[in-house]
Image (spheres, coloured by chain):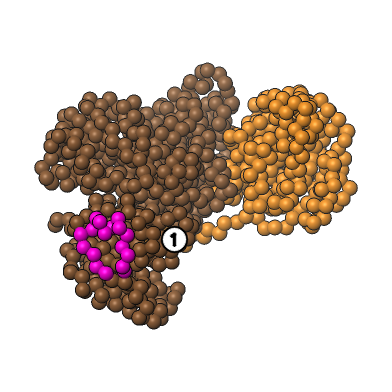
Chain colours: A orange, B brown
Amino acid sequence: MNLSMKTENTCPSLVAKDYRSDTKPVWCPGCGDFGVLLSLTKSLAELQLNPKNVAVISGIGCSSRIPAYLNTFGFHGVHGRALTIGTGLKVARPDLTVIVAGGDGDGFSIGGNHFLHACRRNVDMTYIVMDNELYGMTKGQASPTSAPDWEYGKLTPGGTHMKPFHPLVVGLASGANFIARVSGTNPNGAVPIISEAIRHPGFSLVHVLSPCITFNREQLEWKKMVRDAVVPTTNDAGKAARYLMSDDGFNLGILFKGDRLPYDLKSEKTVDGPADLEAQFSV
Amino acid sequence: MTEQSISITMTGSGGSGVMTAGNMLLDAAGRSGLFGIMTRSAGPQIRGGEAAAMLRLSNKPILSHKDQFDILLGIDWKNADLFASEIVLDNNSITIGETGIPQAFTESAGRHYELSVAEIAKQIPDGRANMVALGVAAKLISIPLSAIKEVLTKSLLKQKGEGAVRSSLEAVEAGMAAASAIPSIPAPTADPEAAANNWSITGNEACGMGAIRGGIRFVAAYPITPATEVLEWLATNLPKLGGKLVQAEDELASINQAIGASFGGVPSLTATSGPGIALMTESLGLSVASETPIVVIDVMRGGPSTGIPAKSEQSDLNIAVFGLHGDAPHVVTAPLTIADCLMTTQWSVYLAEKLQTPTIVLSDQALGQTRAVIPGVPDAGYEPERAIAVNPDKTYQRYADTENGVSPMSLPGTESGQYTADGLEHTQSGRPSSKAEDHHRQMNKRLRKIKGFDFGDNWAEASGDDDAEIAVLTWGSSFGAISQAVEELRQSGQKLRLIGVRLISPAQPERMKKLLNNVKKVLVIEQNHSGQFYHYLKAYYDLDAEIKSIAIPGPLPILPSQVRQYLRDWSQI
């Protein structure tokens, strides 16, 4: 197998729609994920990435259907494990651009442990989480980011009474190297931020407010509530932490940009073949 | 040349260095030209605690312990009685050690020699009791001082300096002198020529080496007893070939990292034990459905749940074959011996890659954590032969319904080769589909590629008498003790056939039928409680013979004497 595919990595002639496949999304009308699909294709075009060198990896959930709608390589795996497939792929094939995508349940509940360790490990990939504060594919249960008093979760009538998970604070504390928030209701505003996330070395977390108006009509309001963050991007984790801890969840922008070196396994070939390892077994 | 062997167990409490002495004895025996095995048994302590190093040394390669030990040598006797069920002695056995031999051993052994290695060690500056014991053992087994000297230099000079080598050697010589008071014991005659080609290797190392030979270049690792050494060996050796090993956060991550790397075109593997294989089961199904090849080594231990982590059992056959939900054709193999861990793992990589499906390798603690001196094992020659899509065009379909069921895989980076791998049922192009025709087509395709494949002669090892009416069927590490028993019975005139099955799934009923030609009685022996292999044979093989199950659960290894007894009872001879 020839893996030295250092061919042309850029494709200047492509536009956003060239990154779409002809598969029609399963999403409901008004779903924020349409905006994310548009933003992502625009970013890929802006970065002039050749679709054959991009892999989009996902788990299970509405938003995790996104790889099939793209003209890149894709992997639609099992629930909660998208980051781990992305990690294996990027470590084995550092020449590829790896983007992991999914929802809040997939990433922060069933896949929560992998989220922590992906931030720590800092593999050079981008994680786009489309957060609608609920499980949509199973038709409306509370997720880790649901408000504690959201009454309509079908497994938590009367509310979850649990503190919502704060992905950006947890991501920062765990070592994510790039932290941003965008909105699925403003695709054009998200494009430069997603592009920057893909460009930035190490593990980049892009938290997307992606409303599900099918199971939570109140999220129609998100469009009006989001605003650009008033603070400049920082590389100071302390500053970012103070800001994020007091943030109401609707500030958009690049909120932290770290300078940690990405995960790199040194594996320089020092022997010709397996036979050279046999000497260690000699009695 | 007839087989001559001698078995010795050394015991000692925490910090006594019994394992070091055992390893050095095996190493020195290997250098002098003997073959052998060493198994270890320890209490539940993480570090230290009572331990036993059990060795059998022979002039021929051996696969298992004998029924009893010839020599029990105590560095001390603290808690040694905990090993009474494992250290079987008889009237011909001797014990050597300070006063206070546990009653279990005074009753069973024929002779006792009082000799305190600790007291002898005290008379030597920096002398250690375990080195005195090493000298005693070496003298009794007739291992030359020169071989011990080589081992001491190799293990101690770099780390501990010349002084440590000198004091250890002095202790060994003192032990040898003390042992000359003990009447000599018939010991195997070494062939010094053999040493040049011999290896000292554990089953876990052998699995690691087999994986590398097979072409594995990405490994995801999460530690678990007794599989950890497979991963640790790969962690230091894989990078030398440009491969990569990632320590994952859990087993869910490790199997999916392997799937991700394999999707990228790099042959990938993870290793685990029972609790880990249980966690990985969902993603084994993903590997089946997405047709992404991976190899998972399960070094089995006592189960269920946490079970008995450091002891062997062959009780994961059911989960390996049947654990996946849905109809999920895949491959399950099992090495029969420590040497076979090399070939079976290498072959398993080949099968996974060739068939684009997960292959589970069922090793076990008894193979994995036993160190053996064996003749060096040549490379079996299997290399990854994954069907790769070359110059795909717009008509490319990742899951094309091909004649043999294997569809060429496009690797990321391939022009016009983009597709989405999916655990959802899909069309030939990979688009999610819940249509009956797509589901049936893909299920048929996934089954066909495995059912239609010619697995060749590797599927089993058959030996013994062609005209025997009694056959013993087994798998995994039990093969060792059973081969020994069958060989002994054959030498005493009984006609027997022995079949060790290496390819557990898919079943090979036609091939089995040929091997069992004329056989009237089949004894199925395995190390678990419910007869998992027996029931599997009953379900998937058409055995035209009387068939009986002998299922003996762990943690104690199956002994040749047990097998002989079952065979005598059953065949009424």
Residue at 52%, 53% (x, y): give it: B244
Q: Which residue is drawn at 68% across and 40% down?
A: A108
Q: Please give left or right for residue A277 compared with residue A243 in the image.
A: left
The residue lying toward the viewer, choosing from B533 and B52, is: B52
| Residue occupying image coordinates x 77% and y 35% | A161
Span highlighted in magenta in the image = B98-114
Residue A76 location (% of width, % of height):
60, 34
**Quarter-of-image position of residue B186:** bottom left
Q: How crowded is mark 1: few (under 14 residues within 10 Å), some or many (20 or more)?
A: some
- Secondary element under disc 1, as helix, strand or loop, is loop
**Is residue B119 shown left or right of residue A31?**
left
* Above-or-below relation of B351 to B173: above
* The one of A137 and B46 positioned closer to us in this rendering: B46
Residue B54 at x, y = what percent? 32, 58
The spot of residue A2 in percent (x, y) is 49, 47
Residue type at mark 1 is Gly
Q: In this view, does B153 lie to the left or right of A224?
A: left
Residue B538 percent coordinates (x, y): 31, 27
Furthest residue in direction left, as rendered = B493
Q: Name the residue under label 1.
A: B49
